[in-house]
Amino acid sequence: MRPDSDSLASVEREVISCRRCPRLVAWRERTAEVKRAAFADEEYWGRPLPGFGDPAARVLVLGLAPAAHGGNRTGRIFTGDRSGDWLFAALWRAGFANQPRSVARDDGLQLSDCYVTAAVRCAPPANRPTPSERDNCLPYLVRELGLLGPVRVIVCLGSFAWDVAVRALAARGLARPRPRPKFGHGVAVGFGELHLLGCYHPSQQNTFTGKLTEAMLDEVFTRARELAG
């Protein structure tokens, strides 16, 4: 347990300076040096990403990890990549964001009643963190949940985020339902006063194939607001 003086700002500082996972450190920094041709003139963030949003949020959105040329470039989770384009547009339509798109940390995006974070804070090769990398990041989410007292719904973008959310709630001392709840799009599971809500990840693989549509994403955030009370 952290002292009572723990804060979201202190979690942010620790996340940004984290070097617990050698493979992820090497990958994120190498990607920031080599860059993608389209962003050759930009200075990449190349560090872990903290969560961001409304500290009084009742809805927390949990993603997998930063994109190599999205959040790893811009310094904010989901900002500057295709998945983020879908997510922020949906948050705007649901009234959780003041604008439908985010391209940079200083572009004026503000979230209301919503906080966005990730299961793993560094961009992983092939978007596949290892179990040890997942476990190294877990304490950051556990602390965020402790500091975001009003949170009543965790929207889990994909099965990886769902699994991490279950682990984080267990670490917070919340008894999980038996049997262990399984991820599914639109599935909601209660953990006392808090609910997990499953959503397919807005990856290009899912959005291009129609596995996830705008209407499906909108339904998830409508449900999230209902569950948040």
Image: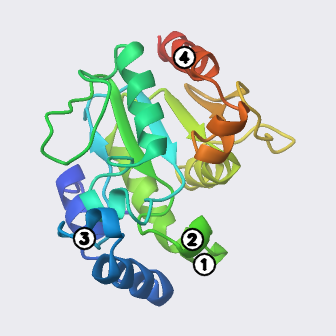
**Dot 1: within a 10 Å radius of its alpha carbon, few (fewer than 14), some, or many (20 or more) residues?**
few
Quote the CA–CA distance across marks 3 and 4: 35 Å
Mark 1 or 4: the one toward you = 4
- Residue behind mark 3: 40
- Please tell me which residue lies in front, 211 or 224: 211
| Among numbered discs 3 and 4, the one appearing first in the sequence | 3
- Residue behind mark 4: 218
**Dot 2: within a 10 Å radius of its alpha carbon, few (fewer than 14), some, or many (20 or more) residues?**
some
Amino acid under disc 4: Asp
- Determine which of the numbered discs, if any, sits on residue 12 in the image: none
Residue 134 visible here? yes
Quote the CA–CA distance across marks 3 and 1: 32 Å
Amino acid under disc 3: Ala
**Dot 3: within a 10 Å radius of its alpha carbon, few (fewer than 14), some, or many (20 or more) residues?**
few
- Please tell me which residue lies in front, 145 or 75: 75
Q: Residue furthest right?
A: 179
SS at mark 4 in the image: helix
Residue pictured at 46% horizontal, 84% vertical: 21
Mark 2 vs 1: CB contact within 8 A: yes
SS at mark 3 in the image: loop
- Residue behind mark 1: 132
Residue pictured at 46% horizontal, 44% vertical: 82
| Among numbered discs 1 and 4, the one appearing first in the sequence | 1
Q: State the image coordinates of residue 164 (x, y, percent, origin top left).
A: 61, 54
Q: Residue furthest front?
A: 37
Amino acid under disc 2: Asp
Residue pictured at 44% horizontal, 82% vertical: 27
Quote the CA–CA distance across marks 2 and 4: 31 Å
SS at mark 2 in the image: helix
| Among numbered discs 3 and 1, the one appearing first in the sequence | 3
Which of the 4 image quadrants contains residue 140?
bottom left
